Structures are given as structure tokens and as C-alpha cells.
Image: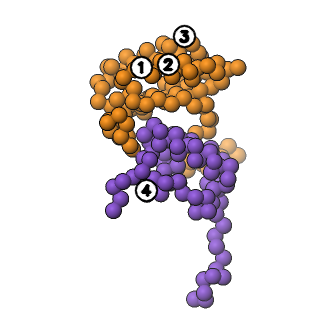
Amino acid sequence: MRDNKFRKKRKKVCFFCKNDVKPNYKNIEIIGRMVTERGKIVPRRMTGTCSKHQRTLATAIKRARNIGFLPFVSENIR
Amino acid sequence: MKRKYETVVVFDGSLPDETINKEQEKIEAFLKENAEFGEADIWGKRNLASVIKKKTIGFYIFFVYTGENDMPEKMEKLFKLNQRILRHMTVLFVPKAVISQKELEKKPEEEEGEE
């Protein structure tokens, strides 16, 4: 296999633009995927989210943490 | 100017259900008096992702209502002195809040049906 440097990377699409959905602190299944195992917010370059939705996503995650839907820090990771 | 708000109230999960029902009725009565009460969505008992006031189980109730812009303050005063409430949060209501992945997958079939 040639050096995969030239392999065409799959273009990442914003999940929220594609599904025409706004990030909301109640849909934990969706925003739970945008958080690392330790509970940190995944950066845009990894998820491909557009900047507009990344901002609303960050507020949604902080609200979810506030009411106990998402952990601030998940400690039991070994 | 009237706006649509959504308040989530997290009760202490170890409380008996009757107490929680009474508290819910009190809040609904307050909302009917001060605003246009929309609906109360009861999510019930859930494990808290992080410990709040040394409790690990919370009982979640969502209230949707339309009111003047001093409503969040009034709600704050109402909840602040109540020991049974672990956490409360008032935000502007956002439509199109898809709750689960199933609803997302269901959407394409609906569109095909309409053509």
C-alpha cells in the first residue's frame, strides 16, 4: 500500500446540519457522543461540527452537566 | 414581552412519590397563577452523573410555560428555599429537541410517506 499520506480523507460533515437538529441539553444520547471518556468536550476538528453548532453544543453540554445528565469529570477510568 | 421557558427541577430521588407529586402540584399551581402553563414532562428517577448535595439519585420534572421575562427570577425565589430540590434550571424553550436516536432514524420514513 503506498504511503497513506496521499489517501483522500473522508470529508466530515456537521451532524447537526445534516440532521437539521439543534443541540439540546436533553438529548443526552447525541451530546453524550461529543464528550470524551473523561467527560471533556471533543474539539471540532475531531467531530467535524460547524462553529455555529459547536457553540450551542458547548452550552448544551454545560447545561447537561449542571443538572446531572453528564459528569463534569468521569473519575473511574483506569 | 412573553416568552416560552422551560424549567427542569431535580428532586431528591430518595423522597417518596407522594411528596414529589405534592411538590409538582404546588409548582403547577404557581405557574398557572403567574404564567400560561404549558405542560409537565416527568422523566422520573435517574442516576445523577455527578453527586449533587451528597445524593446520587434524582427525580426529574420538566415544566414548559409561557410568561413575562421576570418569570425566571420568580422561579428562583420559589425553588431557593425548598430543601427537597437538589437543582433547578430555567432556560428558553428550544423547539426541535430530538430526544433519542430512534426519532432521528424514524425521520426519513416519514418524508418518504409524504410524497
Circle 3 packing at 10 Å, graded few (<14), some (14-19), many (20+), is: few
- At a point 35% along the width and 40% down the height, the residue shown is B51
* Residue carrying label 3: B33
| Residue A19 visible to the viewer | no
Mark 1 — on which chain does it sit? B
> Looking at the picture, do discs 3 and 1 lie on one chain?
yes
| Residue A19 x, y percent position in the rendering | 63, 50
- At a point 47% along the width and 42% down the height, the residue shown is A65
Q: Is residue A8 above or below residue B16?
A: below
- Quadrant of the image containing the C terminus of chain A: bottom left
* Residue carrying label 1: B81
| Tag 2 secondary structure | helix
Q: In this view, does B24 lie to the left or right of B95?
A: left
Give the residue furthest to the bottom: A2
- At a point 36% along the width and 54% down the height, the residue shown is A75
Q: Residue B77 carries which label?
A: 2
| Residue B66 x, y percent position in the rendering | 61, 21
Give the residue furthest to the top: B33
Q: In this view, does A62 lie above or below A41?
A: above
| Residue A71 x, y percent position in the rendering | 42, 47
- Quadrant of the image containing the N terminus of chain A: bottom right
